[in-house]
Every structure is written in C-alpha cells, then in structure tokens.
Image (spheres, grey):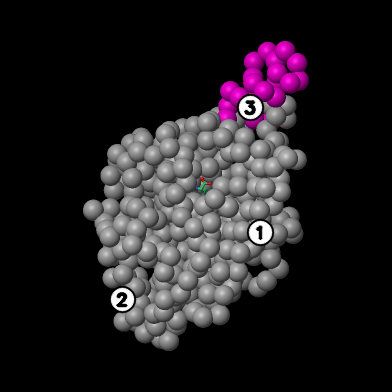
C-alpha cells in the first residue's frame, strides 16, 4: 500500500510506470501475508517489485515501450516473472523503457520518457530508465531490467542506484522480448548490492526453454557479500581514463577507487586496446539481430494492425510504418543493410571479427587482474532533448558499457558520488560467472 500510494502521488510527473497493477498487487500481497504468517516463504515473499515492460506478464499488458505492442497482453509469463511469482514477490506494475530497448535516454518510448528523479528536466538513462527512476524515487524497492548494451548499468548510474548485468546465459531470456538475442540479458536493479544479490538468487539459473541459458549451479549470492577483498587485483583500463574523460566524472571515480585500495585491493593499469571499436561493432551487430527479431511484427498475428489494408503488402507496410518509432526504423534499416548480400562481408562479418578481438582484450586483461573498474557513463544525466536529434551522440553514451555485452561478461554499476549535483556510477566488470565477487566488492564499498 505504501508503494502504491507513492506511485499514485509521484508517477504522473516521473512517468516511470507504463502500467500499475494495483488490484492484482494487493491480492498478491495478501497471499504473501498468509504464506509468511504460516512461517513459510522465501526472503522475497511479500517484497514489492516492478518489471521492465519487456518481460511478458500473463494478463497484464506488455508494451515493450512501443505502439506496436500497446494492445498486447501476453498469454504467458517470462521465466524471470514466474520465478518471482513462485518466490512470492508482489508485482506493482510494468516500467517505462525505450521502444524495444533501443535507446540510452528513455526518450524513444511511445509513452514519453520517464524523468530523472534527481532533476526532472534530465533523462533517467535507458533503456531501463523507468526501472531506474522508480527505484531511485522509492516507488518500488527493486525492479528488473535488461541490458543489451548498457541498459541496466547506464540508467542505474544516472539515477544513483545499483544495477547488475549478469553473464550472458545466467538469466533466462524466455519471455523477454528479443532485441539482439546474442547480447540481451536480464538483471536486477536495486538500492544496494545486498538487495541485488537477493534478486539475482531468484532470477538466475538454467531454463530448458532458453537454449542459451547455462546449466550451472546458482550460488547463494548473499553468502559472500562480506568476504574480504584484501589482495584483489583491480585493473584500470587506460583507454577509460584517457585525457578526454570528463574531470567531473574522473574525480569521484578516482575517489571511489581509492576506497577500494583502502579496503585492501591492489590497483594496476591495464589496456583494452580495442575499446574504441566497441561502439561501431555493436551498432552493426545489434541492428542486424534486431532487424531479424522484429520481422515477427507483421500486423497479422498480434500487435498493431493498420485500418483497412488494401492487400498483404499494404498490411505489412502500414502496420509497421504506423507503429514503429524513428529509432526502431533506423535500426531495422541499418540491420537489413548490413545483412544484405552485397554488404554482409564488409559489415556484418567484419563486426563479428571485431567482436572476437574485443572479447580477447578482456581475456588478456583477466590474466593480469581479477576485476576491471571505470566509469559507467561518460557524463551524468543529460537534459531531455539534448541528444534526441543526434543518434551518434546518443550512441556514444554507451562507450564504457557495450564492450561488456559483446564479450558476454558480467558487470555492475554502483553509485559513486556526484558530479554537478547529479549521481554518477562506478562500473565493476568481472570474468564470466563472477557475479558473487562483483556483488561482494560493491557491498564492501557500500
Ligand atoms: N543504448 C543501447 C542501444 O540503444 C543499449 C540498449 C540496451 O542495452 N537495451 O542499443
């Protein structure tokens, strides 16, 4: 009731929820009360939670931030959603996001952008901006997000919360609307690493309905939170701390790293030489996969359908033309172009080779150090409208986050001070399946 009241009071301005499921939430809360009173339940039982509107929820609209799915109610729950249901969590509603998770500011949402709770004229980041804003403004204690190229970490940084992108394959993608399937990964967004650990305990694990989910045991992520970090080797990639790093960001990030040193970690300089290739590589691979994934929206089976189509081609063209926003159309055009017969070798194949080089940078780095740290985002939250007419400027907001997705590694962003009165995030990147270590480092710092 407390959170529903806050949503009622504050969401009109923040626009962080697309759907609020008041009645169902109260029903689930009552059921959770009964379970807890009988002495049963899990640490998640009765905990209110919001899901990014990319996760299918049976009986509750799943829009993916798009006019295309504004009329869509999924007939089934995503695995992430059903795991939380089974654990007794209470779903408050579905959070705002960039259309089909394409964006870094929430401004491509069909429902208008969520606002940054720290400054309402600024973006919350994206694409999981609604989840980040809702957690930061205490409209929910925690939320789910997805990260294809930074969409959990960058909004977490811009709103001053903790967000974790797990190793690719750690969390099931079943029922999570696909953007770029080889990069997409769901994860927790919360106030603290401890809360994120509790959420990940519920989210992670093998799912036979996702062929890329990994069959590996899930540790209890809360058990190692207090472990000592004495002697851990932290690498600072020189490419992340080059002269062009905004000093407003560099100062608090360096102060945060000093704190890890104080806690016993050793700091080393490392190099990720192909860092500058990550943005161009990602913006070939992700659009290629999205152009294929989004071909299912044809106006025939579900989603938006244009009025009075003349013939089949008109149905396809107008249903898609009238309901996809400009960023989604741009990605589909780029994707079909780079996959086309004459250009495949020059763009898509080349990008796949660069992807391998970027992964190899990390492989090499993890022979020298245990952990990599740097800023999550090159700037604090920017003004609404500041980059919305300049796609390349928007894509550059992702320079520190997307190489991690290309390599499939886990990484988290934690609040690390302020720049110009706005929160900024420290990014902690680990080797495959090192989520427990990442959460441990974050917890010790917090
Ligand atoms: N900003 C990136 C993009 O627009 C990442 C989005 C994401 O991680 N879903 O593609």
Q: Is residue 202 magenta?
A: no
Q: Secondary structure at mark 2?
A: helix
Residue bearing the label numbered 3: 320
Q: Nearer the viewer, mark 1 or mark 2?
A: 1
**Residue 341 visible in the displayed image:** yes
Residue located beneath label 1 in the image: 353
* Along the line of sight, the residue nearer the viewer: 216 or 349: 349
Q: Nearer the viewer, residue 180 or 31?
A: 180
Mark 1 vs 3, N-terminal side: 3
Residue 5 image position (x, y, % from top left)? 36, 43
Mark 1 and mark 2 lie on one chain; the one further toward the N terminus is 2
Magenta span includes 305: yes
Structural distance between the alpha carbons of marks 1 and 2: 36 Å
Q: CA distance from mark 3 to mark 2?
A: 51 Å
Residue wearing tag 2 = 258
Badge 1 marks a residue whose secondary structure is helix
What residue do we see at 33% from left, 52% from top? 380
Image quadrant where residue 309 sits? top right
Q: Residues within 10 Å of mark 2 (few under 14, many from 20)?
A: some
Residue 114 appears at what percent x and percent y?
A: 40, 40
Residue 223 marker: none
At 47% from the left and 36% from the top, the residue drawn is 108
Task: Tally the numbered discs.
Answer: 3
State whether residue 445 is above or below residue 265.
Answer: above
Which residue is found at the position 73% from the left and 30% from the top? 301
Judge whether 166 appears above or below 85 on screen.
below
Q: Is residue 9 visible to the viewer in this orientation of the structure?
A: no
Q: Is residue 156 left or right of residue 172?
A: left
Note whether ligand 1 is within 8 Å of mark 3. Answer: no
Q: Do labels 3 and 2 touch, CB within 8 Å? A: no
């Amino acid at each position: 009731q407390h959170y529903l009241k806050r949503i009622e009071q504050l969401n009109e301005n923040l626009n962080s929820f697309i759907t609020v499921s008041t009645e169902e939430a109260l029903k689930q809360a009552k059921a959770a009360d009964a379970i807890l009173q009988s002495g049963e339940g899990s640490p998640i039982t009765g905990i209110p939670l919001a899901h990014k509107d990319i996760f299918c929820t049976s009986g509750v609209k799943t829009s993916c931030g798009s006019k295309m799915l504004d009329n869509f109610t999924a007939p089934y729950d995503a695995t992430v959603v059903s795991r939380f249901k089974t654990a007794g969590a209470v779903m408050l509603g579905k959070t705002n996001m960039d259309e089909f998770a394409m964006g870094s500011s929430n401004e491509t949402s069909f429902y208008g952008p969520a606002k940054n709770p720290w400054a309402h004229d600024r973006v919350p980041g994206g694409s999981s901006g609604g989840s980040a804003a809702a957690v930061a403004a205490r409209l929910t204690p925690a939320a789910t997000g997805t990260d294809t190229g930074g969409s959990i970490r960058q909004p977490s940084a811009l709103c001053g919360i903790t967000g974790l992108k797990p190793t690719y394959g750690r969390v099931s993608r079943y029922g999570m609307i696909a953007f770029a399937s080889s990069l997409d990964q769901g994860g927790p967004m919360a106030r603290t690493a401890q809360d994120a650990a509790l959420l990940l305990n519920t989210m992670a694990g093998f799912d036979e309905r996702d062929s890329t989910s990994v069959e590996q045991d899930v540790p209890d992520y809360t058990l190692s939170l207090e472990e000592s970090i004495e002697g851990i080797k932290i690498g600072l990639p020189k490419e992340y701390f080059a002269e062009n790093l905004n000093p407003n960001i560099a100062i608090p990030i360096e102060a945060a790293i000093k704190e890890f040193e104080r806690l016993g970690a050793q700091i080393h300089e490392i190099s990720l030489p192909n860092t500058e290739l990550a943005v161009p590589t990602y913006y070939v691979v992700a659009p290629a996969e999205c152009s294929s994934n989004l071909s299912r929206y044809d106006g025939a089976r579900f989603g938006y359908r244009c009025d009075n189509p003349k013939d089949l081609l008109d149905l396809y063209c107008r249903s898609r033309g009238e309901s996809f926003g400009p960023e989604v159309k741009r990605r589909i055009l780029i994707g079909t172009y780079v996959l086309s017969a004459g250009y495949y070798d020059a763009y898509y194949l080349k990008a796949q080779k660069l992807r391998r080089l970027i992964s190899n940078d990390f492989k090499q780095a993890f022979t020298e150090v245990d952990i990599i740290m740097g800023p999550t985002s090159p700037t604090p939250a920017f003004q609404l409208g500041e980059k919305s007419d300049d796609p390349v400027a928007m894509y550059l907001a992702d320079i520190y986050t997307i190489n991690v997705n290309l390599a499939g590694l886990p990484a988290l962003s934690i609040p690390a001070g302020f720049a110009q009165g706005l929160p900024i995030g420290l990014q902690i990147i680990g080797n495959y399946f090192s989520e427990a270590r990442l959460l441990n480092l974050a917890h010790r710092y917090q």
